[in-house]
Image (cartoon, grey):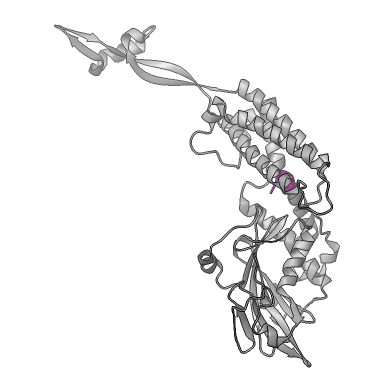
Amino acid sequence: MRFIETQKLNDYIASVDNILAGDSLRSAYAKIETVRTASLQGFSIEGDREFLKELSYVLNVIISIIYHPHIANKREEVVIRIEQAQYIDEEAFRRILTDSSLWKQHGMKMVPEQVHHYQHIDELRIYENRFIGLLISIIDKELSRFSSFYLNKLPTLMMKDVTLDDPAVGEIISEIDRLRRKVQFLMSTHFFKEVTKGKPISRHVQPTNILVKDRLYCYCYRFYRKFVKYEDISDAKHDLRMYYFIHLLAEIKRHGYYLTPPKSPEDEDRLLFEGLDFFLEIIPAENENLEMTVRWRKAKRVETARHLLVFSPNGGERLTPDEIEHKYGEYKTVDFISLWELTASRGEIITESVPEAALISHWLESKTRAAFADKSIYERYCPVCRSRDTEGQDDMHLCHFCGTEYVFTEVGSRDMIWFRRIGVVE
């Protein structure tokens, strides 16, 4: 996620917490219509321009710091040849007399060859300068995200109903390229190379005297606190899950599901929904993810499917079949959702460049999709990819080519399919 998106997400979650504070999951659903489902995508190009202006100013401030950084004067003891010492103080003279390793025999005499000497070194790698190095690295990654984001929006000849002479996106990309060149300059300096040696400092930056009182360092620190909202990625995942959870509850209500009353005290925090065609159960899963179990009420026997939605602030993962089986083997599908796209577990993009409500709606509808179908045909041909590489047992069928799994049942005099898993056709 970009800085500006994390800031809006943080503000949105804070406003939602004020409304839902102390509520159980069930009471949260009852109040869902009072919670605004804001779109975090809804930033204008003008808003991004303003942010890039601020980023440009921060980089100019960092350049000023690099030319005149705070340094620490460190006293370091070394052993040097005696002729290199410009002077020998009283303490050094005493140590010469007591340290025999500094002496060497010349003929019949013992002559001091070396001396303990204290030199004063300007130490650049103080905490505040290491923070500036961290900020440069973070801005570099942020500009890479901006570049990827706007390059995906750049009109091409393959897009429908677009012109290639619209300057808006091109101007943003040119500004991003200019700022990236400036960052590359900063990263090539002796300052950056020196302060980024070794293990980086924690992102939980401490407000030292220099960061608070020095005008230049303070500006960088305030910028960091304003925009770098999530030092820990798990915090971002938690808020992103809450954000999409609100969207999901709104979509479930829009699709006509109602929340069933709890059958026991243990069910008080379980979300069980009933609709015309499906029963849904939604529960929080491990690692800030969300699990949904779907049951088709028209099936002759109880058929369920468990699905996992993984909240991924920086986009989806690409997993091998072995990794999928090892990490998520108990689920029919595993999908990754960010602010901008929904991807399958093997990295295939399911849908992108639509509002967040449309992303979550697509996910919900893909798990609750049923259709009337000619059973005599689709027992032999996959209804998703048309492959004949299918096998079935009773009313359950699996396509080995795209992974689609579907169930037949009779509804009156017609055959109907429920898709327990819709495969991805590349």
- In the image, the segment drawn in magenta is 1-5
Residue at image point 42% right, 21% down: 76
Quadrant in which residue 344 is drawn: bottom right
Quadrant in which residue 86 is drawn: top left
Residue at image point 59% right, 34% down: 131
Q: Is residue 274 left or right of residue 138?
A: right
**Is residue 63 something one can see in this rendering?**
yes
Q: Is residue 83 left or right of residue 289?
A: left
**Is residue 270 something one can see in this rendering?**
no
Q: Classify 90 as above or below 17.
A: above
Q: Position of residue 380 (x, y in %)?
A: 64, 83
Q: Position of residue 423 (x, y in %)?
A: 65, 71
Tell me the quadrant of the picture where the C terminus can be found: bottom right
Q: Classify 401 as above or below 214.
A: below
Q: Position of residue 179 (x, y in %)?
A: 69, 33
Closer to the camera in the image, 31 or 184: 184
